[in-house]
Image: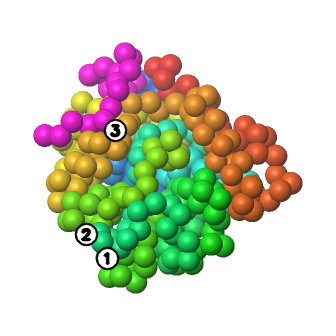
C-alpha cells in the first residue's frame, strides 16, 4: 500500500458525510431536473472513486434523478462541455476556470478536488533539453486551455520567452505523451498519469518542475444550474465529500479505482497519488484565490485573457463557497 500525500484536517473523521444525507432537504418537484450530468477525469481521482462506487446514483434515485457521467480528457474539454451545457459539473484546473470565466463562460468554482503537482515540462531521455531556455525553436506538445498549457506559458515567461519562441503542437494530453515518446515532438507540457507512466518506463524525464505553478483541481458548476438547483448542488458536493473522505482513509481503494479506470499499472497510480496529489482540503480559500489571480495576471500579460478584463473581479465572480460551506456545516 502506498502513502498518499495528504494532510488530513482535524474535522476529517471515520464517520462520513453520507450520514447527513438522510436529513437533507430534497429539491422540489417543480425545480429538480430528471438527470444531472457530471464529468469524471483521470486527473480528478475523487471523481473516479465516486463514479465506481455509485454513491451519487444511490442518493439521487429516491428523488427520481438519474446521473450521467462524461469523461473529460483535459480542462479544455471540461470547459467545452460546460459551455455547451452537456455537463452540469465539470472538473478543471483552477487557472482554466479563470480562463473560462474571463471568456464569458458562466460557471462557478465550488469545490477543490485536489492540490496536485500534476504537470511539469517533459522531454525524452537523451534529448539534450535540460532547462526551459532549451525549448527555444523546439516543437512542444501542449493542450490549450489546460493547466499544463498555463504552466508552459508561465515557465517560458520566467526566462524571457513566450509561445512565439517555440513551435506549439496542439494535441490532447494522451496524444502529446505518445508524440513525445515517438520523437514527433521535442518536449511536452505533461499531465499525470501519462507523465508518471513515462517516468516509470524510463522513456522520459521531467526537466522543469515547480509545484507552485500548478493550480488547484476545481469542480465547477454551470451558473444557471446552480441558480435553479442550489440544494441539488449542495447535495452533489455532500456525496463528493463522502468519496473524498473515504479516499483519505482508504488510499489503496483510491489507487485501485484509478488503476481500473485508466488501465495503468499500480506503480503509475501510486506515483501520481502518493507523491503528487493532496486531497485534504475541499474549500476554496485565500491561497486558491491568490493562485487564480497570479495565473490570471500572466495569462493577461501574454494575451490569453483580454487586456480589458478585470482579473480580480473575474476571480471573485468565479469563486462561490456558499455550497461547500453549507455542506461542511453538517
**Mark sitting earlier along the chain (1/3):** 1
Q: Which residue is mark 2?
A: 203
| Secondary structure under the numbered disc 3 in the rendered image | helix
Residue 243 is labelled as: 3
Instruction: Write down the quadrant of residue 161 in the picture.
Output: bottom right
Q: Is 210 situated above or below 198? A: above
Give how far apart the Cα atoms at labels 1 and 3 are: 35 Å
Observer-nearest residue: 244 or 197?
197
Residue 8 on the magenta span: yes
Along the horizontal axis of the image, is 291 left or right of 114? right
Tell me if residue 13 can be seen: yes
Q: Specify whether 1 is left or right of 279.
A: left
From which residue to which does the magenta span run?
1-20
Q: Quadrant of residue 168?
A: bottom right
- Give x and y (percent) for residue 222: 63, 51
Residue 300 lies, with reference to residue 288, above or below; the image says below
Where residue 5 sits: x, y (%)? 31, 35
Residue located farthest toward the top when viewing the structure as drawn: 10
Q: Secondary structure at mark 2?
A: loop
Give the residue number, with chain letter if any, for mark 1.
Answer: 181
Up-down relation of residue 144 to residue 257 (above or below): below
Q: Residue at x 37, y 37 (%)?
A: 278
Choose the circle earlier in sequence order: 2 or 3.
2
Q: Residue 256 location in percent, x, y? A: 19, 50
Q: Earlier in the sequence, mark 1 or mark 2?
A: 1
User: Which label is found at residue 325?
Assistant: none
Q: Which image quarter holds the N terminus?
A: top left
Amino acid at each position: 500500500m502506498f502513502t498518499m500525500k495528504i494532510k488530513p484536517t482535524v474535522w476529517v473523521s471515520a464517520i462520513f458525510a453520507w450520514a447527513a444525507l438522510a436529513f437533507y432537504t430534497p429539491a422540489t418537484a417543480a425545480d429538480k431536473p430528471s438527470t444531472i450530468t457530471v464529468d469524471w477525469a483521470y486527473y480528478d481521482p475523487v471523481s473516479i472513486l465516486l463514479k465506481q462506487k455509485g454513491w451519487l446514483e444511490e442518493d439521487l434515485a429516491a428523488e427520481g434523478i438519474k446521473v450521467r457521467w462524461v469523461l473529460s480528457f483535459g480542462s479544455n474539454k471540461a470547459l467545452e462541455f460546460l459551455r455547451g451545457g452537456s455537463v452540469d459539473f465539470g472538473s478543471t484546473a483552477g487557472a482554466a476556470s479563470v480562463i473560462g470565466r474571463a471568456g464569458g463562460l458562466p460557471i462557478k468554482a465550488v469545490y477543490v478536488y485536489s492540490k496536485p503537482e500534476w504537470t511539469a515540462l517533459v522531454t525524452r531521455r537523451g534529448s539534450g533539453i535540460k532547462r526551459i531556455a532549451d525549448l527555444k525553436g523546439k516543437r512542444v506538445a501542449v493542450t490549450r486551455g489546460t493547466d499544463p498549457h498555463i504552466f508552459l506559458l508561465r515557465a517560458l515567461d520566467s526566462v524571457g520567452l513566450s509561445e512565439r519562441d517555440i513551435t506549439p503542437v496542439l494535441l490532447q494530453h494522451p496524444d502529446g505523451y505518445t508524440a513525445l515518446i515517438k520523437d514527433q515532438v521535442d518536449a511536452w507540457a505533461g499531465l499525470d498519469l501519462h507523465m508518471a507512466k513515462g517516468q516509470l518506463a524510463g522513456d522520459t524525464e521531467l526537466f522543469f518542475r515547480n509545484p507552485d505553478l500548478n493550480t488547484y483541481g476545481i469542480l465547477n458548476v454551470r451558473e444557471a444550474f446552480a441558480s435553479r438547483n442550489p440544494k441539488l448542488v449542495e447535495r452533489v458536493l455532500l456525496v463528493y465529500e463522502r468519496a473524498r473522505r473515504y479516499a483519505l482513509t482508504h488510499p489503496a481503494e483510491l489507487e485501485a479505482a484509478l488503476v481500473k479506470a485508466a488501465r495503468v499499472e499500480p506503480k503509475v497510480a501510486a506515483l501520481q497519488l502518493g507523491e503528487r496529489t493532496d486531497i485534504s482540503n475541499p474549500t476554496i480559500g485565500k491561497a486558491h484565490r491568490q493562485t487564480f489571480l497570479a495565473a490570471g495576471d500572466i495569462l493577461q500579460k501574454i494575451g490569453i485573457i483580454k487586456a480589458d478584463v478585470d482579473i480580480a473581479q473575474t476571480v471573485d465572480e468565479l469563486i462561490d463557497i456558499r455550497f461547500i460551506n453549507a455542506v461542511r456545516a453538517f
